Structures are given as C-alpha cells and as structure tokens.
Amino acid sequence: MSDTTSHPDPRINVDVVSDALLGKWKKERLESRALAADPRLHTINGQSMDEHRARVLEQLGILVENGAIQRAYPSDLGGSDNHGGNIAAFQELVLADPSLQIKSGVQWGLFGAAILHLGTRPHHERWLPDVMSLKLPGAFAMTEIGHGSDVASVGTTATYDPDTEEFEIHTPFAGAWKEFLGNAALHGQAAVVFAQLITRDVNHGVHAFFVPIRTPEGDLLPGVGSQDDGVKGGLNGIDNGRLHFTHVRIPRTNLLNRYGDVAPDGTYSSSIESPGRRFFTMIGTLVQGRVSLDGSAVRAMEAALAIALRYGSERRQFPGASGRDTVLLDYGQHQRRLIPRLAQTYAMAFADERLLTVFDEVFSGVGDTDENREDLETLAAAFKPLSTWAALDTLQEAREACGGAGFIAENRLVGLRADLDIYVTFEGDNNVLLQLVGKRLLTDYAKQFAGGDKAALAKAAASQLGDRVSRFGLRQMGQSIADLGQVARSVESMRSPESQRALLTDRVETMVSEIALALREATKHVPKGDATARAIANEDAFNAQQHKLIEAARAHAELLQWEAFTDALAQITDPGSRQVLTWLRDLFGLGLIERNAAWYLVQGRISGQRAQAVTAYVDRLIGRLRGHALDLVDAFGLSPETLRATIATGIEAERQEEAHAYVEAQKAAGTWPIHEKELRKRAQQEKQRVAG
Amino acid sequence: MSDTTSHPDPRINVDVVSDALLGKWKKERLESRALAADPRLHTINGQSMDEHRARVLEQLGILVENGAIQRAYPSDLGGSDNHGGNIAAFQELVLADPSLQIKSGVQWGLFGAAILHLGTRPHHERWLPDVMSLKLPGAFAMTEIGHGSDVASVGTTATYDPDTEEFEIHTPFAGAWKEFLGNAALHGQAAVVFAQLITRDVNHGVHAFFVPIRTPEGDLLPGVGSQDDGVKGGLNGIDNGRLHFTHVRIPRTNLLNRYGDVAPDGTYSSSIESPGRRFFTMIGTLVQGRVSLDGSAVRAMEAALAIALRYGSERRQFPGASGRDTVLLDYGQHQRRLIPRLAQTYAMAFADERLLTVFDEVFSGVGDTDENREDLETLAAAFKPLSTWAALDTLQEAREACGGAGFIAENRLVGLRADLDIYVTFEGDNNVLLQLVGKRLLTDYAKQFAGGDKAALAKAAASQLGDRVSRFGLRQMGQSIADLGQVARSVESMRSPESQRALLTDRVETMVSEIALALREATKHVPKGDATARAIANEDAFNAQQHKLIEAARAHAELLQWEAFTDALAQITDPGSRQVLTWLRDLFGLGLIERNAAWYLVQGRISGQRAQAVTAYVDRLIGRLRGHALDLVDAFGLSPETLRATIATGIEAERQEEAHAYVEAQKAAGTWPIHEKELRKRAQQEKQRVAG
C-alpha cells in the first residue's frame, strides 16, 4: 500500500482552523472547556443511578461557584445578558458529562429561562436569585404522557378562582401527568407548569405557572404526586420523573404573565390578540434548548472522530504488502466510514455557529424582529434534527471502527452515544421539527404566489423562477433547469461551488413545488362547501406527502449547512487551510449529491455518467484528505482531559511498536521460528530444483 | 384521515405464519421461550455491574438445571447431538437477558465447543462434563489486543519443550494479551488459548490449548495475569477481561489435537497438510457463534417492532380531521419508518432458518462436505452482519418512534440496543465478514474462467452469461441484460418475483464482474517478474475496490434473504397469509431496489420513470400493510413475559380512552370551557352578521 501517513502539502494551519471553529464565542467556549476538564465534573463509569444523581446535583453547585451558568441572566441579578456566550459555554459541557449538561439545562435553560422569558420583573426578583444559586431547583413541566410534541393540547388545567384569587392546577387523567421531567423525581422544589388557563369558563390556551412542589427538605406538597422514571437508556445522572397535581392551589401572581394575565376579578388580558400567535410566541422563547443541543451534538461528533481517527491511525490489522500490518486508516473502507463524517462534522459546526449568531441577535435584542424570530425557529428546527442524528450515527460508526475497544466505557464512545440518544426526540422530536421546517418551506412557496392562481403556480413550478424569500427560508436558484444543465454539464464543473449550490438548491425547490402541487390537486374535486370533506382530503393528501416533505426539509437543512461551510471558508485566508477545507467542503457537497443521486438521475439533473464521476471524485477526495485527518481533528481543539479516551492517548501506537520491536529483535537474534508455510515453500522449491 | 384501523380482508392466519417463523426447531424454540419467561432469568434494570455479573452466573446454573445448554454435546456425555436445535434454543435467550445469553455462549458455545470440536475424545471425557455442569467455567482466549479479526497473526506462543513434555504459553508483549474475554475477569478457571504452536523451531500456526487459569477459589495460577475490562456499553452481566501468560507451562496433552498434534519428541503431525487450510478448518468449527448471533438479532428486531407497532397503534398525537387525535401509525412518516423494517425482519427470519438448516446439515454430519462447510461459512458471514446491523437500526428506530417512553429502561428498547451493539463487531467484525463474502464471490467468479484469458473474462462480464456456481455462492441470471430490460420493461412486471430476482441478481453479478476486471487491470502494466511491485499494485487495487466489494457482498446477502423469503412463501398455502406475506416480500424486494435506485439508473437497468413507479408502489404496499401490522407482529409469538415492555401492554390505549372519556363527559355535562379561539371565531361571525 502506498505510504499515505507522511504529511502532505498543503497542510492546514491548525490554529487558524481551530479559531474558525471556535467562532465568535471563543472566550466563553475556552472558559467552559477549561472548567469541563475538572475531574470533579466527569462521569464515573458504572456509578449506580442514585450515586450518579447525587454527584450531578453536586456538580451543578460547582458550575454555580465557577460562574458558569449565570451568563444569560440579567446583569442586575448577577448575570451578564450574554445569550450567545451562554449557549456556547453550555454546549462545551457535553464532554464533561451529558447528565451534568442536561440537568444544568433543565435548571437554568428551561426552568430558570421560563421564569426569565415568560415571567415579569416581580417574578425575576422573587425567584431568579435562588434559581441561579441552586437554592431553588426546579422542573420544567411541559410534556405530558399523552401529549409529547403537541404542547397546545396538554390536558393539565389551571382554573382561576376569583374568590380566593388563586389558580387551581389539576391533572384530570393519567395522560395529563407531566412526564420525563428532570428534577421531578427527587430534587425539584418547584416547577414551571404548562396548563390550559381557564378563567370565567373560557380556555385561553396554554400558559406557564410557577408551582411549588416540594419543601426544601424534599417532602412533596399537598396535592402534588411524583413518580420516578427510573433507569433510562442514558442520562442516568438526572432524576427524571412524573408530576401530577390534584387541585393544587397557587396564588394568582404565580402565573408567568409576560404574554397573558388574569386580573383579580378573573378578566383575561394579553398583549397578543391571536391565541395561536400568543402560544407560538410563548413557546418560541424556549428555542434555546434546540440551539444548545445542536452545538452539543457537534461537539460529541468531534470527540467521536478525534478518538476513532487517532486510533485508526495507529491501529494495525492484517499483514500488508509492505511487510508490516496495515494501518486501519489506510484501508479504503475505513476511510469511507470516517472521512465523509469528518466533512459533515465541519459543515455542522459552521452551521451551528450561524444558528447561534441568529439566536444571539434575537435574544440580545439587536435583531429581535418577527422575521428573525421565525428564521431562528426554522433554522433551529432544521439543524437540531440533522446534528443530533448525525451525532448518534458518528458515535456509532466510531465505536464500530474501534472494534471491541470502542465498546469499553473508558473509551467514551458508548457512554456519549447512550446519553445523546434522547437528544433526537427531546426539545422537539426530530421528525416533528423537520415537518415544521417543511411547512415553513410550503408557506414560503405559497407566498410567492399570493393571490396567484393555480396556473401561475404550475408555471412557476415548471420554470423554477422566483426570488429568495428570506434569509433561511426557501431559496430558489436564479436560473432555470436548462441553465442548471449547463452548469453541471462537465464533470469538472460539478466540483465548483456554484454547481454544488445549484444542485442542492434545485432539489429543495423542486421537491417543495411538487409537494405544493400535490396538495393543491388533492382538494380539486371536493366541493368547496363541504368543509369536513375538504379537511379530510387535505389531511390525507398531506399525510401522503409527509415523508417527502420531511425529506425536503432535510435537503433544505443540508443546503444551509453547505452554505455555512462555504461562507466560513470564504473567511479563511491561510492558503493551506483554505485548500484542505475546500476539499472537505467539496466532499460534503458532492457526498450529498452522491447520496441523493437517484433523485438527480430521475429528475434528469445529472446523467448516469456524471453520477459515476461524482462517486469517483468523492473517492479521490477521501484519499486526498486521509493524510489531513489528524490535523483536521486536532483543529477541534479537544484536550486529552476533554477526550479522556484511553485509546486516543497513543497507547495503541506504543503497543504496536513494542510488538514490532520484539519481532525484529527475535529475527536479528535468529530466534524467530520459521513458519511451516515458508518451510513447505522452500521444500517445494528444492524439489523443483532437484527435478529440474 | 381515512380509517385504516379496521381489520382488512384478506388477513393472515397468525398461527400459520407463526409456525412458518418458528421453523424446523419449533419445539426447541418454544421450550427455550418458556424458560426465558422465568423472571429469575430477566434483567434487573439499574443493577450494578458486580450485582449483574453475580446474577448472570447464577442464571447459567438455572440453564444447566433446566437442560437448556446440553443439546449440542454428545449423547453419551449427557447431550443430545442436536446442533440446529441447540442454536435455535440459544437464539431465544436474547429476550431473557443478552448478558445471560452471551455468557452462556462463552461457556458452552465457545469454550466448551472448542474442546468439543478442536479436542479429541480424551479431552471430551476429561473436561466436558464439568464444562456442561458449570463446575468448570472457562474463557475463550482467541482475540488479542493487537489482533482482533486477524486471528492467524496472534502473538501468543505455545512453545513445545520435549524435555518436560510441556507447552509453554507466553504472551511476549502487551499487544498479545488476550482481550475482551467473557469469564476472564472473574469466573473462568480455565481458558482455551489460541497460540502459535512452535516445536523444533518451526511455527505450525495457530492451535488451541487448554490452559488452567484460576483455582476453584478464584485465585489466579502462577504466570497468569488478568485485567478487568470494567464497564462496557452493554452486556455488563459478563465479566470481560484480559488474560496474559508469562511462561505458563501445560502438559503436552492439553493441546486440543483434532487437527494437529505434537508427539512426545516434538514431532508435529496433522491430517491436513496445508497450514492455511488447517487454520481455516479449525476456525471454521467456530462458525456457530455467527449463526447464533444472526437469529438472536432477528429476535431482538421482532421484539422492537412488536413494542413500537403496538404502541404506535394506540398512541395518539395532534388533532386530526376526524375530531380525535391521530393514531401515530396512521401517519405516513410513521408507516415509512416501521413497516419496511417489518418486511426486512421477516426476510431475515426466513434467511436465518435457512442458515440454521445448512449449519445443522454440516454439524450433524448429514451433509458435512467441504462445499457445504464453505457455503455455511459464506452464508453466516453474509447474514450475521446484515441482521446485527439491522437489529441496531430497528431497535433505534423503534426507540425513537416511541419517543421519550422508548428511552425508559422498563420499555426494553434501550437495553437491548446497548447489549446488541457489540454483536456487530464480535464473532467477526461485520465489515471484515462482508469482505470475506466478497472474496468468495470473486473466487466463484474466477472459477468460471479457470484457464480462461482476459478476453474471455471481459466478454463474460459484458454478456453476463454463466452458471450458478454453488448453492450460496455467486449466482448469475440465466439471461442477458437485454432480457432483463424486457422483464422489467413495464411497471407491472417489476412487481413479479421474477423481475425482482433478476434485478437483485444482476446487481451482485455486475458489481462482482466490474471489481474482478478492475483488479485484473491493476497489474497489467507491472512486470511479471517484479513480485513486490505486483503485490503492492494488487493491494492498492484491492483497497481501491474494498468499499465496492463490501457493497457487492451486502447486495449478495440481500438477494439470499429475498430468496429465503420467497421460498418460505412458497410453502404457505393459506390464501390470506400468502397474499399478505407476498405484499411484505414485495415491499422487501422493491425496497431494496428503491434503496439502490441510483445504481440501477446509472447502469441503465431501469428508467427514471420506473424508479418513480417503484417508490409509488412501495408507498402503496406500506399503506396496504398498515392494517396488517399488528397481525404480523402477533405472528412473532412473543408473549408479554418475553416482551416485558410496559408500553406494549395496552396501557397507552387505556390512558387515551380515559382522557377521551373525561373530555366527552365534561362536554356532556356542559362543563367543558369554550376555547378563546372559538369565542373569537363566533364574535367575528356575529360582527359580520351585524355588518351584513
């Protein structure tokens, strides 16, 4: 096998690339990484659930002491109004212990953040200091057993009683019990409970209420019940559980009343007239959970690849033509398994930085417009599913690429995978989120034809002409399919960013327009007057398109990731870094086209020959990047204290060298036994010599 | 949404299909399932590693008492020489606790089986009774830290000393330490150690030796060292660990000498002349591990789908046009996620039955020919990777489809996934096994042209003509590509089994011939005399084709699975069962074609239009099978005691009914508060009425 381990030219400048990855909140990230290197914050493998829960509670105290969780809170209450920096720092904690990370997320990113964003100044002053100091641990009681993703339909009620000026919190059936809540089983003393606000016999929809649930000594308050969710597939340092409420009374002022209030006499008022918009505004303040998970997933992928690529660069298996056993990463299949995932990780890292930037603009108030909030929600709903799924996929491939060693807990891969499993369904189920993105794409598409008729729509679908709708919504190529054919005609040009962008954009655009047309067609023959029949026809049609819509949303998210990578690349001036990252970006872009080759072929966007050329070029890029793999994971900047995987410490290279030296010494001393195979070969040769 | 929950016509006869799935070893399977229902054999979630290990050791004793592990051993030693039945029964144990299953596999399927198959009568008499009774727990010491899949290169040596008539077992460097061995950390009193047999200064290759390692009290014997692997990603009921040996001496007669022996004076002898063939014969006796894992993976998939499909049939989310919340399994995306995996599970179940049949023929002696052994190894190497990967994929999709409930340990999905993770890299790393299959395909391909020249090869590759080589090796269509075009011309005909078979076969055949040609091309320009240059060129060429070869092996395995499903279908006479299973088989076959559509399009085997028609038909099949999903999982015959998942007990339907009844009662009593949205709508209408 040709020697590919020597350092190739050009090379990346690790510091330059590392800075690009650290992004705007470099300072906060590095502070958080330094803290995450503290052994007191690390997982102890094999701890019992009870021990782990107790340890994580202590760890939260260490975060408080180190000023690690205050950043997003108001300056005058001890915070620093730093929203982007807060999330950036939070993301880094995943490599200390995901249980610690998520329990801190429950306390300060959900429970505390709900008081901050849904409550008003008196609530902040009354509760936030104790929330920040951990004197008041709390649960975020939104999800119910019977209503996971469908928050608008929760069964818990908060009924106002003007006589006592109290709300009565009540879970009328088992399906309304609040479920999977961190801090609910043991440590929570209060909960922000989401319930249907009922006053004067009118249900004003879901609102949030501050409800005390336990005494500081840990005894449940009257009417409050709790069940422990027990052992989970991961995150066992968190005391997830259920809460149920039987006519529990709380003062009127415990309603977190930023977006809706009830006067002492029971009169409801809100600054947002539409109940629908009010609901989505309230829910929208909680987008930071998704933003947090996106970057955390990227960090876990980086760790997985840092471990697997280092091990794969040292580990040898099966004798090669060179005389020594072959290094794993020199195998074509091993490269195919890991290097495209490295390209994807870079794309997702740059995409997360973009998401965080929009998040910070909105939450800092610099760019808090309706459009930006909508963009932020769409972007978070697009990126979080892809990155959390990619994290599981990458951790698993890394684990398998490390063989049995990958299965040992001290090498970290299995623990991270187990903990991150739930990231794909919490803070918004990934499929539900992608459907949300898909609906946004359909809305953007329809906006282009507001007032237009079906003929215009059909014509547009055919010509693919249109304007870019918003920063992160549906975008369209400024060219027709015929032009696209031109761009992508030669294999050469497929490598250009312009043609990658055109092909990726075209796929989203075409899928969305096809879905839009199919949905319009569905009700064509149903009488306009028959609302029920139309509703059913619409629902059936949407359902038939659901899978495709989710695929379109995925394609849209991939395009945005590709654009984020391309934009980040444009900022890099160091020539070596730029060259290598360009290959990596091309691998990401062409990898997407290769994966969806069937679609491009069916649509006549590329020829069979060109599809084969894409695969051949992907293979060449992978081979070319093999020699840069270690530099590219070094640029992640994950210290040994952050990785803490025995097999990523160089131990395997030591073992291989020891074995090699032993054999060489034996051979030199003439004590290396000859193999029977060799003996037989020599005897055969001797026989031939004698016969000849 | 149209009502798809009512039972459609035709329906399967659950008993008929259940019998087809239970197959030849129904009796043994049912016995084993009954035993696996015993609570003493069940996992206790959250047990510490130490407690779990102790419990699993006790559980092995229960298996012995119940005659559950003796089947494969000789009748005169208390067994019943029932090889197929033994594996069938073993496979069922995965649903009791995979730790229990695999620890019993270590003791009786590896340690004991090595003594049985590699040892001779005196070894059997001396050790097997104690192995069977568990008086003598043992480890199977094959894998080394430095040599995982490459057993031929292990570093451990067994050097014969004629003066004392002993072998000296030695691990000369850390890479030669035996690693990941069940029973090594705690319970093993002996180990079958695989080491290079050296006598009279000649290395005769890897042989197996019986080496005592601990006293019955648990103390390590002199020269033997052990390290505990500690916490793992799963299977924590097994005491995996490392063993190392420093000049440990064992009697000459501890060599398991069925295939190679050393006389007192140090003379080596073997019934198999070629050291290579001898090695593969010895290793081949251990194929039962792979066969066992294949069926175990299928059982886990069945459990995953039984849980997720039952829950998905009861769980409701988001209001539908019908007025009630929609049942998850009525969503298009939910169906797309689960129903194709149900088809795959059926295919893999029937494929495993076929594998087990060949295994039984070989091991019972009924068909113990070289060709059958080779077929068995290829078949096991083809099926085990696909089923173990599919198990992880299916368990994960099921977990996500159950949302947060899927993450709770008591619902089983996460535990099974964690335990089965290692199945994809142990008993042969999946990628290495598929490469083995790929090489077999290349060999079969070359056999057709033995003595032929390149021109013949090229011609053959172009014409695709040839004979079927062996039962499970490379097969070829008896028709040319032109004919195939004919078969698959109309969408209608794509649904016929003939065209599915032709398309699946064609893909394997074409890929293999392309790879064979590429490999031949590689050395074309290298001088015949330059052996080193040719070796390097060969290696580079093979490496460049490695990914494709593994994909070809996967395609071959899928074809064999499809054939197994089709053959099983032919045995079913009940019309309803036959019809529904035909749809399921078509979904499996067309699903494969859909997944590989890019290949078929690039190769010109199907048109873009036909590719779209495949997707449309797959969608229709999924919709049609939705109403049969519960019947199809009922046919798995997994009792509540076997599944033991709370969410698969009907509890969700109860909760949904309770909630529904509560709301209906409130509405009937007039105490259901009107929603602000409805109020606003009415006010709007009133305004219009007044205005109008």
Image (tube, coloured by chain):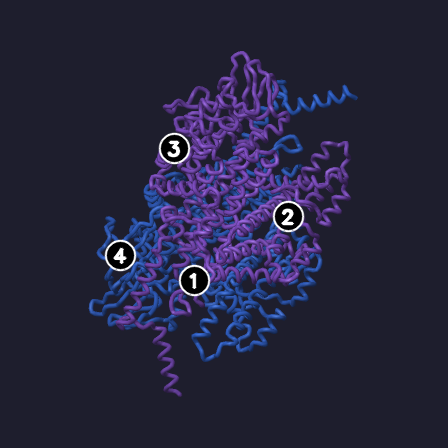
Chain colours: A purple, B blue
Q: What kind of residue is marked 2?
A: Val
What residue would you read off at disc 4?
B212
- Looking at marks 2 and 3 on the same chain, the residue that comes earlier in the sequence is marked by 3
Numbered mark located on residue A7 in the image: 1
What residue would you read off at disc 2?
A508
Q: CA distance from mark 2 to mark 4?
A: 65 Å
Q: Determine if residue A458 is in view.
A: yes
Instruction: Write down the quadrant of residue A125 in the picture.
Output: top left
Q: Determine if residue B86 is in view.
A: no
Q: What kind of residue is marked 4?
A: Pro
Chain at tag 3: A
A373 and A689: which one is in front? A373
A143 and B630: which one is in front? A143
Q: Is the residue under label 3 in contact with that under label 1 (CB below 8 Å)?
A: no
Q: In the image, residue A461 lies at what x, y percent?
A: 72, 47
* Callout 1: SS: loop
Instruction: Say whether mark 1 and mark 4 are on the same chain.
Output: no
Q: CA distance from mark 2 to mark 3?
A: 45 Å
Q: Residue furthest top?
A: A163
Identify the residue at horizontal 57%, vertical 60% (top origin): A615
What residue would you read off at disc 3?
A64
Q: Which is closer to the viewer, label 2 or label 4?
A: 2
